[in-house]
Image (cartoon, helix red, strand yellow):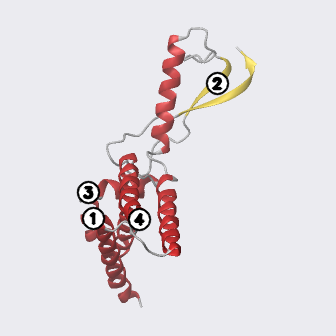
Amino acid sequence: MGRFRKPLYMAAGFLALLLGAIGIVLPLLPTTPFVILAAFFFSKGSVKVHRWLLKQKTFGPMIQAWEADRVIPYKAKLLSTTMMLTMVSYPLIFRPFSIWLKVLVVFTVFYALWYVWRHRSEPLDVTVERSWNKLSDIDAHNPSSPIKTTDEKIGLQLKPNFFSGRKKPVPLGWKPAHVVMIQATDHVA
C-alpha cells in the first residue's frame, strides 16, 4: 500500500491544481482552497513538485503564507470576493433558471466568502507589533500617559515576549516581530 500512496497524492494534487485553474474562470469553483489542497497533496507526494509550486509567482506567496501561519493575504481576499460576486451576480439577476439552483449558488458563494474572510490577513505577531507601535507612538506624544518605556511604570509592567523566535518561515517579506506582553500589576511605582 505504501508504494501507491505517493502516486495517489500526486494524482490528487494535479486534480486539485486543475480544479483551481478552472476556478479562475468559473465562479463556483474557488481557486485558493484548491491550490492550497494541491500544495498539501504535493507535499505528501513529491517534495520537488511541492517546491516548484511554492516558487510559482502567482500562487507561491499565497501557499507560503497559508503553510506558515494559516494566512490569506488581504489582496487575495479582495480579489476573490470581487471575482465571486462579479461572476455570479449577472447570471443570478439576468438569467432565468430555477429558484432552488439560485439559492444553492448564493449559499455556495456566501460559504466561500465566509471561509476566505474568517482567516487572518497577516501573521498574528505582525498585527501585534503594528498595534504596539501605534500604542508606543501615542504614548510618546503624551507625557502624562501611564505607560512608560522604562522599568518604572504606573500600574503596568512590560514583559518581553516569551516566544524568542519563530519556528516557521515568514512569507511575503514579513519580518519576525518582537512582541511585548503587557501585564497588569497591583503595585504602583
Distance between the alpha carbons at the discs numbered 1 and 4: 14 Å
Q: Residue furthest right?
A: 186
Distance between the alpha carbons at the discs numbered 2 and 4: 43 Å
Q: Nearer the viewer, mark 1 or mark 4?
A: 4
Name the disc covering residue 58, or none: 3
Residue type, mark 1 in image: Leu
Residue located beneath label 2 in the image:
157
CB atoms at circles 3 and 1 under 8 Å apart?
no
Q: Quadrant of residue 152?
A: top right
Q: Nearer the viewer, residue 67 or 186?
A: 67
CB atoms at circles 1 and 2 under 8 Å apart?
no
Q: Is residue 45 above or below residue 73?
A: below
Name the disc covering residue 33, or none: 4
- Which of marks 1 and 3 precedes in the sequence? 1
Question: Where does the image place residue 92, in percent across and percent down from the top left?
Answer: 43, 65
Distance between the alpha carbons at the discs numbered 1 and 2: 46 Å
Q: Secondary structure at mark 4?
A: helix
- Which of marks 2 and 3 precedes in the sequence? 3
Q: Secondary structure at mark 2?
A: strand
Q: Nearer the viewer, residue 77 or 38?
A: 77
On screen, residue 113 versus residue 189, left or right, reads left
Residue located beneath label 1 in the image:
53
Q: Secondary structure at mark 1?
A: helix
Q: Is residue 42 above or below residue 154?
A: below
Q: Nearer the viewer, mark 2 or mark 4?
A: 4
- Which of marks 2 and 1 precedes in the sequence? 1
Point 48% across, 57% down: residue = 113
Distance between the alpha carbons at the discs numbered 3 and 1: 9 Å
Residue type, mark 3 in image: Thr
